[in-house]
Image: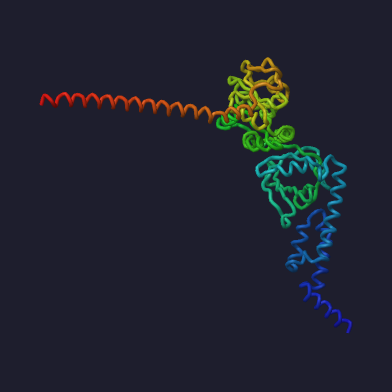
């Protein structure tokens, strides 16, 4: 009787949940198996799904899997706290977010069987999402040994974890990499052209980053552009780029041509220099974005370290070709130019009116000449009639 009652209970459970108690017990056993410890939760889920599809989502089974996974994460977190980086380290998270296919990254890692001493360079093979979009995954291969065991970076809930195959590991340190340099004549010419006029930083350096990404692909440069863009989104990115060029050993021939000196400066409301340009239109564009003004320089200013150091500082009065009373009112305000443009319609009307008056005068003169000619012809006709 007892045996029959137990069988009926199991049968009802299987009808209600779709899984028998035997299947659930087997799944819980797999989830708790030491063979799947150390971060191999994918292996455990795959083994459970072979029993019956969807079994890993059963509340009891999922709870054991979750507990096992949390225990692993706690162990990894304890290791990382001893090391230099935590899973939610801003540098680590930011680097993960920026990673794209083809980039390189250097990691110093440790596992239960190996303590990392040196940095190893990896290539990003792919970046996608797993676990129904809840987890971001980056697949890495060792540079120079692509057939070695693949490594993985996972980001979930703002935390980044590392795995060597199915084995969990910790990240001790990270070095950002360089994935693009102007090493072809075409790239060098493109960079030289870009550097010949101001490059807007944009919000958090996004505009300059988009422009430079494929020419000088360097994480440290992108970080510097980010910082500069946070301070002044409308500023010129070239000083930051030139600093990176020097660090990366990019030849001077690619740098901004000093044969094209600056003739104009864009100055903000406080009289601080926004940037310099050899083209007045570019200077006006910078000034307009900052509601500032354009200053014509007394003499051309070469593009060098001195001009870079003048950014965000007051422009000396002696450099203004058309100085006013104070440096705070140097140059022509963009608003004043707009007011002058608004006056143009009246001037145009006067010119048009003058043209109309000339036309009327000329018509009147022609009409008078026609009238005189007609009168002369009539007189001649009258004189000829008596003789006839």
Q: In the rendered view of the protein, which quadrant contains the N terminus?
A: bottom right
| Residue 339 placement (x, y as % from top left) | 61, 29
| Residue 268 placement (x, y as % from top left) | 69, 27
Would residue 304 be found to the left or right of residue 44 on screen? left
Q: In the rendered view of the protein, which quadrant contains the C terminus?
A: top left
**Residue placed furthest toward the bottom:** 1
Q: Nearer the viewer, residue 180 or 236?
A: 236
Residue in the picture at 85% in, 41% down: 83
Q: Taking the image as drawn, is residue 134 in sight?
A: yes
Compared to 244, does 86 lie above or below?
below
**Residue placed furthest toward the right:** 2
Residue in the picture at 28% in, 27% down: 371
Would residue 335 be found to the left or right of residue 364 on screen? right
Q: How many marks?
A: 0
Q: Nearer the viewer, residue 215 or 56?
A: 215
| Residue 58 placement (x, y as % from top left) | 79, 66
Compared to 237, does 11 lie above or below?
below
| Residue 206 placement (x, y as % from top left) | 68, 38
Residue in the picture at 61% in, 20% down: 263
Q: Nearer the viewer, residue 45 or 378?
A: 378
Q: Nearer the viewer, residue 311 or 370?
A: 370
**Residue placed furthest toward the front:** 386
Residue in the picture at 68% in, 30% down: 235
Would residue 144 be found to the left or right of residue 27 on screen? left
Image quadrant where residue 104 sits = top right
Q: Taking the image as drawn, is residue 245 in sight?
A: no
Image quadrant where residue 43 sits = bottom right
């Amino acid at each position: 009787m007892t045996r029959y009652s137990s069988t009926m209970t199991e049968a009802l459970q299987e009808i209600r949940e779709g899984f028998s108690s035997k299947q659930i017990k087997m799944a819980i056993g797999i989830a708790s198996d030491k063979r799947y410890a150390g971060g191999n939760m994918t292996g455990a889920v795959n083994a459970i799904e072979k029993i019956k599809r969807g079994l890993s989502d059963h509340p009891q089974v999922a709870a054991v899997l979750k507990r096992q996974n949390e225990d692993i994460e706690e162990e990894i977190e304890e290791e990382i706290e001893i090391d230099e980086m935590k899973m939610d380290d801003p540098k680590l998270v930011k680097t993960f977010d920026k990673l794209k296919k083809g980039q390189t990254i250097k990691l110093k890692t440790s596992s239960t069987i190996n303590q990392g001493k040196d940095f190893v360079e990896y290539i990003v093979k792919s970046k996608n999402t797993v676990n129904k979009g809840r987890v971001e995954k980056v697949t890495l291969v060792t540079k120079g040994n692509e057939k070695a065991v693949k490594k993985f970076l996972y980001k979930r809930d703002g935390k980044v974890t590392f795995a060597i195959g199915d084995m969990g590991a910790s990240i001790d340190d990270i070095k950002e990499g360089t994935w693009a340099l102007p090493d072809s004549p075409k790239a060098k010419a493109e960079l030289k052209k870009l550097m010949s006029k101001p490059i807007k930083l944009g919000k958090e350096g996004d505009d300059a980053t988009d422009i430079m990404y494929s020419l000088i692909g360097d994480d440290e440069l992108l970080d510097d552009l980010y910082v500069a863009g946070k301070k002044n989104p409308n500023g010129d990115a070239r000083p930051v780029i030139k600093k990176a060029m020097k660090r990366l050993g990019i030849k001077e021939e690619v740098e901004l041509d000093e044969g094209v000196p600056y003739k104009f400066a864009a100055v903000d409301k406080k009289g601080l220099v926004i940037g310099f340009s050899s083209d007045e239109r570019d200077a006006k564009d910078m000034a307009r974005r900052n509601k500032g003004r354009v200053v014509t320089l007394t003499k051309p200013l070469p593009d060098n370290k001195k001009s870079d150091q003048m950014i965000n500082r007051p422009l000396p009065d002696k450099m203004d070709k058309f100085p006013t009373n104070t440096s705070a009112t140097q140059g022509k305000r963009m608003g004043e130019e707009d007011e002058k443009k608004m006056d143009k319609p009246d001037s145009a009307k006067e010119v048009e009116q003058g043209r109309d008056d000339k036309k009327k005068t000329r018509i009147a003169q022609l009409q008078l000449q026609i009238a005189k000619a007609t009168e002369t012809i009539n007189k001649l006709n009258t004189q000829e009639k008596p003789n006839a």
